[in-house]
Image: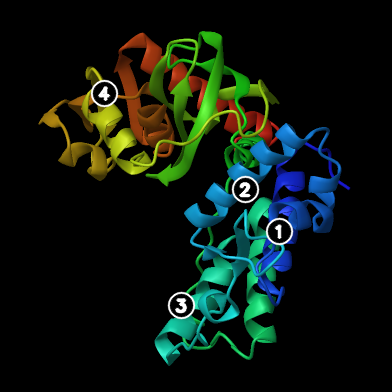
Amino acid sequence: MSAPNSPAAKTERLMNLVMTLLYTRRPLSRARLRESVEQYRSAPSDEAFERMFERDKDELRELGIPLVTEEITAGWEDEPGYRIHQRDYALPQIRFDSDELAVLGLAARTWSHATLAGPAGTALRKLRASGVEPDHEAFAFVEARLGTREPAFGPLLEALLAETPVRFSYARPGGESSQRTVQPWGLTSQSGHWYLTGLDTGRDAPRVFRLSRITGKVATAGRPGSYSVPPEHDPVAMIRRRREGRELGLARLRVREGAGNALRHRAVVAAGKDGWDVVQLPFGDVQDLAHEIASYGGGVLVEEPQELRAAVLAILRAAADAHGGSGR
């Protein structure tokens, strides 16, 4: 059995309560429920059982489970009984058209990251068990993949699902690192990067963190279920506001003729000499721009700022080291 106060124990208790209320032929009193549900029997006192049962009732109703209160026949007239009617609880048969089946098949193949590959496969097996066979051929030409190489992703996902605060070391664009304690609210991929949104408890304010800047291990910093994600939280909007409000810098680049077209579209370009143009480009994130510039290899050179130049050189050196310094 799971630890008494763990999320797994709570889930197990709620499932036992639902099964008990769903398959009873008549309403059950609190006393009978305490006898029937194992976790209630082990409650240390009547008061502890009452608090636990009241929380469980509210949670089941918030989940949309139709728990009802009814009168009990002779012998229990002084207290209400509880039950769940099967006719209200049962779901109608789920049907999918051909396009929906094709999308389901594609969605199941999308997650290549090990953390979510298992749940995606489990969902697909459940569909097949219920007689639904997703269409893999309709989108055979599409190879969608959604993954992440950041080591922080797995621990952060687990913390987010369990609503557990975390602590990690976070590097700012200049390279300085600091310890942050965060209540995770969301994990979102934007423009090729993964972001964590949440409440930075040290600063008592919502913050956005790019996973590639989390260094070292992610550690838990509190109990599971010790906070709740705000119902109005919109991670995409939060990331967008962070980008729009970010102070812009100005990069001065030298770009070889015929290279860096994507940079040129966003910049002020002045003709240079010897086959190079001078490009002035506003930017908001040093690392984002550094990775873009590094992708052009020797076609783009950074003149200023020095922070950007150092970031590009660090990326190119790391790439060279990864290939044994051969330059291939």
The correct choice, above or below, for 245 with respect to 34 in the image is: above
- The amino acid type, in three-letter code, at marker 2 is Asp
Q: Tell me the CA gap for discs 3 and 1.
A: 35 Å
The correct choice, above or below, for 249 with respect to 194 in the image is: above
Would you identify the image quadrant in which residue 287 lies? top left
Give whichever of discs 3 and 2 has the lower sequence position: 2
- The amino acid type, in three-letter code, at marker 3 is Val
The correct choice, above or below, for 20 with respect to 227 in the image is: below
Mark 1: few, some, or many residues within 10 Å (few <14, many ≥20)?
many
Q: Identify the residue position indicated by label 3 in the image.
A: 103
Does residue 12 appear left or right of residue 196 in this picture? right
Does residue 208 appear left or right of residue 245 in this picture? right
Give whichever of discs 4 and 3 has the lower sequence position: 3
Q: Identify the residue position indicated by label 1 in the image.
A: 17
Q: Is residue 321 visible?
A: yes
Q: Tell me the CA gap for discs 4 and 3.
A: 44 Å
From the top left corner, tell me how far across and down residue 182 is, in percent: 53, 22
